[in-house]
Image (cartoon, rainbow, N blue to C red):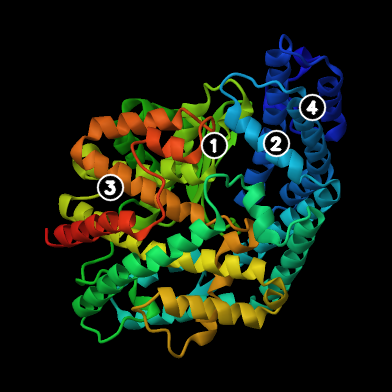
């Protein structure tokens, strides 16, 4: 019956579960043996692709305008009425394939994931997972509504980041205070939301027979290739190797600014007093310049970006009511990705666009794989695709290539980018350490005051070099400003692991750009058909955690910052 399944989103955009159900039922009843397996799995893949496209497009509409009640309603109804039934059907179909003993070609890793999902699934968790997703949308609504009045105009908090680059320290401080005061207005609401989410996640873990949500999340996220012990090793390595490097960079920045101590509003200004980088005028200009750069990185990758431009699958500008952050999602029926972000003209927006373009390229490169399950790559490597693209594009950022910067400004951008990478690792350790504590000490974590205290303890341990005295409330509630903690629990260490992979690819590119890019693209094309270490190896990198292997990468980044600042 799959011959009747529409191949365009417009034909399925209003589907509810009654429209999907006959196809799932057909897959349950159809004979499954070695001869029928390719067709059966191909149709299963189409069912998943259709459902995912519906979800993805509704998610895009919801985040494009958090004030659009109709978009919110349609997303909510899909989450409530389609997702639970789809999860149950997915479980039944996975169970059927696992029980058959059949293994499709090039399917060992996806099959292992299916086996884990079958073992972890509990039907009573389906409504709880749906409820958690819905509560996650509340976080977006709270954050999306946060604005301040600045110089007589209502500004989003993203727009206010421009002021944090102002050379006038008084202006920066006033802007930073306004941002923090506004976010603290939602302190009680976010605390309440957190406790509700924590309790749901504890129930999900208990239903699955797990000691805590960390154990559940590790299996749910298919972390077969590393353990919580490895994560702890990684955090210790950051404390040993990266925190001192980050502190040295902060000390140099304070000296350049001529201040005895850095304050939170001193982190984004140019330490040498130069005007802030303004690499583009608006989203259209960002799009145009990015297209020129990506063609230089690789004509095929540049062609992918042009396809997205032609389809208008780029939503780049910040605006009131738009959900915070940036992401790349995919429309599997059409076989194309979509990029969402909040650009306001800052140099960090360049990095965000290149980052999300890396995700988009991953989708393009992996789309030739036959089955949807093969294209589901692990996040730990998905973020390598994005972070490596940020670095692979750096030789082509200048106006000579149609890019954003003059030669001196490109050096400024690159130095700031590498410094941000170094500063990121300690922050990642705080987020990961906080979640590790919260989900293994859930009784304590149900008290937001104890969460504040734990965040503050980790912040003081890892984020050395910036003085927050007098702003303790803003410091201890930093976990409120990390959407992953609310919406995507335990999704953050992936960024740190991936950044190590990206730095290795960048190091390779310094020696042989052509080979590094070829390895990068070859690895992306593997999708999720290899283990995490196997994907890293294909990209010319190693999957590492320990201080001994991390130290040379951090030393290279820190040394390059110094060289670029001297230009």
Q: Pointer 3 and pointer 2: residues touching (CB < 8 Å)?
A: no
Q: Secondary structure at mark 3?
A: loop
Q: How far apart are the alpha carbons under marks 1 and 2?
A: 16 Å
Q: Earlier in the sequence, mark 4 or mark 2?
A: 4
- Give me the disc on residue 96: 4
- Dot 4 alpha-carbon crowd within 10 angstroms: few under 14, some 14 to 19, many 20 or more: some
| Earlier residue among tags 1 and 3 | 1
Residue closer to the observer: 445 or 467: 445
Image spot of residue 386 (x, y percent):
42, 44
**Crowd rating for badge 2 (residues with CA inside 10 Å; few <14, some 14–19, many 20+):** some
Q: CA distance from mark 1 to mark 3?
A: 31 Å
Between circles 1 and 2, the one closer to the viewer is 2
Residue pictured at 68% horizontal, 19% vertical: 42
> In the rendered image, which quarter is residue 552 located in?
bottom left
Q: Which mark is residue 377?
A: 1
Mark 3 highlights which residue?
Answer: 404
Q: CA distance from mark 4 to mark 2?
A: 11 Å
The reply to whether discs 1 and 4 touch (Cβ–Cβ < 8 Å) is: no
Q: Earlier in the sequence, mark 1 or mark 2?
A: 2
Q: Which one is closest to the eye, mark 3 or mark 2? A: 2
Nearer the viewer's eye, disc 3 or disc 4?
4
Residue 412 appears anywhere in the view: no
Label 1, label 4: how far apart the Cα atoms are: 23 Å
Question: Which quadrant is home to the C terminus?
Answer: bottom left
Of all residues, the one furthest to the top in this rendering is 35
């Amino acid at each position: 019956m799959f011959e009747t399944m529409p191949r365009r989103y417009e034909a399925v955009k209003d589907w509810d579960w009654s429209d999907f159900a006959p196809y799932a039922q057909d897959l349950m009843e159809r004979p499954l043996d070695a001869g029928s397996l390719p067709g059966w799995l191909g149709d299963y893949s189409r069912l998943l692709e259709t459902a995912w496209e519906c979800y993805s497009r509704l998610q895009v509409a919801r985040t494009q305008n958090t004030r659009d009640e109709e978009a919110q309603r349609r997303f909510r109804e899909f989450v409530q009425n389609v997702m639970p039934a789809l999860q149950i059907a997915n479980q039944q179909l996975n169970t059927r394939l696992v029980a058959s003993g059949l293994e499709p070609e090039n399917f060992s890793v996806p099959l292992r994931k299916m086996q884990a999902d079958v073992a972890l699934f509990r039907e009573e968790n389906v409504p709880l997972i749906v409820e958690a997703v819905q509560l996650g949308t509340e976080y977006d609504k709270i954050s999306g509504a946060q604005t301040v009045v600045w110089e007589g105009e209502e500004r989003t908090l993203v727009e206010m980041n421009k002021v944090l680059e102002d050379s006038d320290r008084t202006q920066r401080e006033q802007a930073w205070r306004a941002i923090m005061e506004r976010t603290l207005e939602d302190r009680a609401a976010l605390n309440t939301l957190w406790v509700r989410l924590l309790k749901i996640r504890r129930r999900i873990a208990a239903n699955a027979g797990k000691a805590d949500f960390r154990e559940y999340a590790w299996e749910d996220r298919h972390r077969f290739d590393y353990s919580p012990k490895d994560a702890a090793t990684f955090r210790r390595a950051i404390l040993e190797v990266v925190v001192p490097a980050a502190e040295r960079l902060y000390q140099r920045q304070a000296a350049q600014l001529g201040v005895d101590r850095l304050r939170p509003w001193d982190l984004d200004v140019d330490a040498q007093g130069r005007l802030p980088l303004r690499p583009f005028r608006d989203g259209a200009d960002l799009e145009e310049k990015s297209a020129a750069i990506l063609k230089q990185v690789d004509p095929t990758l540049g062609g992918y970006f042009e396809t997205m431009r032609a389809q208008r699958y780029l939503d780049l500008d910040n605006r009131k009511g738009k959900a915070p952050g940036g992401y790349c999602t995919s429309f599997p029926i059409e076989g194309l990705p979509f990029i969402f972000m909040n650009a306001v003209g800052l140099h960090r927006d360049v990095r965000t666009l290149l980052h999300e373009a890396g995700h988009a390229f991953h989708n393009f490169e992996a789309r030739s794989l036959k089955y949807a399950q093969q294209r589901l790559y692990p996040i730990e490597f998905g973020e390598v695709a994005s972070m490596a693209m940020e670095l692979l594009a750096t030789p082509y950022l200048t106006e000579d290539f149609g890019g954003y910067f003059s030669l001196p400004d490109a050096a400024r951008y690159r130095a700031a980018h590498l410094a941000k990478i170094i500063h990121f690792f300690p922050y990642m350790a705080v987020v990961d350490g906080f979640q590790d504590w919260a989900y293994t000490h859930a009784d304590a974590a149900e008290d937001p005051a104890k969460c504040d205290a734990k965040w503050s303890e980790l912040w003081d341990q890892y984020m050395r070099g910036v003085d927050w005295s007098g702003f303790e409330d803003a410091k201890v509630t930093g976990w409120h400003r990390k959407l992953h903690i609310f919406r995507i629990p335990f999704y953050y260490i992936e960024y740190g692991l991936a950044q190590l992979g990206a730095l290795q690819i960048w190091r390779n590119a310094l020696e042989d750009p052509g080979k590094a890019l070829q390895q990068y693209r070859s690895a992306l094309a593997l999708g999720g058909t290899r283990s995490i270490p196997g994907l890293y190896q294909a990209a010319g990198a190693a999957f590492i955690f320990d201080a001994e292997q991390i130290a040379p990468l951090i030393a290279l980044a820190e040394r390059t910052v110094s060289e670029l600042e001297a230009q």
